[in-house]
Image (cartoon, rainbow, N blue to C red):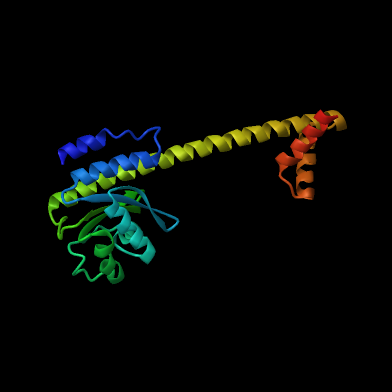
Amino acid sequence: MEAMLRELSRVVLVDRALSDVLTDITRIAAAGIPGAESTSITLLRDDQAFTAAHYGEMSLLADELQYEKGYGPCMDAGRGGVLLRVDDMQTEQRWPDYVSHVYGTAGVRSSLSVPLPYQGSSIGALNNYSSRPAAFASPESLAAGLEVAEVVAVAVANADAHHQLGEQARNMRIAMDSRAVIEQAKGVLMAQRGVDAEQAFEILRQASQRYNRKLRDIALGIVEGTQTR
């Protein structure tokens, strides 16, 4: 497992698309988790599940079958934040509609789904599949799966933080632009009507309420009207 952890530590998280990062991680996981033949990452957004990355077609087919049925170990692990191991799909009693189809559809005989921890909850699952029964019964498989799940959660958190910073910067630019145009409109009103800054702002506010429009839009109309003339 040490070799897998070293390789995971070399995955670059910053300034990369999340899909590229997760694709790298699934490849490393499929090679490093004992028993894994194919690995995928299921993410949950607004309770909608989707495969964010996968290594091998087996995992993608198994995931898609669960999304189609609306339940299964990968979805329940992600929603419930619990680790779910299936040693033999042919004798498994949980998820009967899923397990009765997954071997014929994807060739899956056993699986290990590990929840992705994020701010005290779960945002999805790391899914590992095998064509052999009890492929993930060893403690080494569990330990490796938990280690990879932590790395996936960090990668998703990093991507979310980067997105939030971008949104904050965009909102700040909008706020600054709005303030600038409002100040310009106040200057126009002060010059045209001989009022002070506070009175000019009150005129803008009343117009905003009267016409049910944003204050910035009222201000922009005044500024543009002056420039046209």
What percent of the width, then of the height, locates residue 216?
71, 39
Q: Is residue 37 left or right of residue 11?
A: left
Q: Is residue 37 left or right of residue 207?
A: left
What percent of the width, then of the height, locates residue 187?
78, 29
Residue shown at the point (23%, 59%) measured from the top left: 108
What percent of the width, then of the height, locates residue 35?
16, 51
Residue shown at the point (14%, 59%) measured from the top left: 134
Q: Looking at the rendering, in which quadrant would you find the N terminus?
A: top left
- Residue 118 vs 184, above or below: the answer is below
Q: Nearer the viewer, residue 221 or 19?
A: 19
Among the 4 quarters of the image, the one containing residue 109: bottom left
Asked whether the viewer can see residue 40, the reply is: yes
Asked whether the viewer can see residue 121, the reply is: no
- Residue 150 vs 121, above or below: the answer is above
Among the 4 quarters of the image, the one containing residue 60: bottom left
Q: Nearer the viewer, residue 38 or 226?
A: 38
Residue sitting at the far front: 104
What percent of the width, then of the height, locates residue 86?
21, 62
Q: Looking at the rendering, in which quadrant would you find the C terminus?
A: top right
Residue sitting at the far left: 138
Q: What number of labels is visible? A: 0
Residue shown at the point (23%, 46%) measured from the top left: 30
- Residue 93 vs 210, above or below: the answer is below
Q: Is residue 156 left or right of residue 110?
A: right
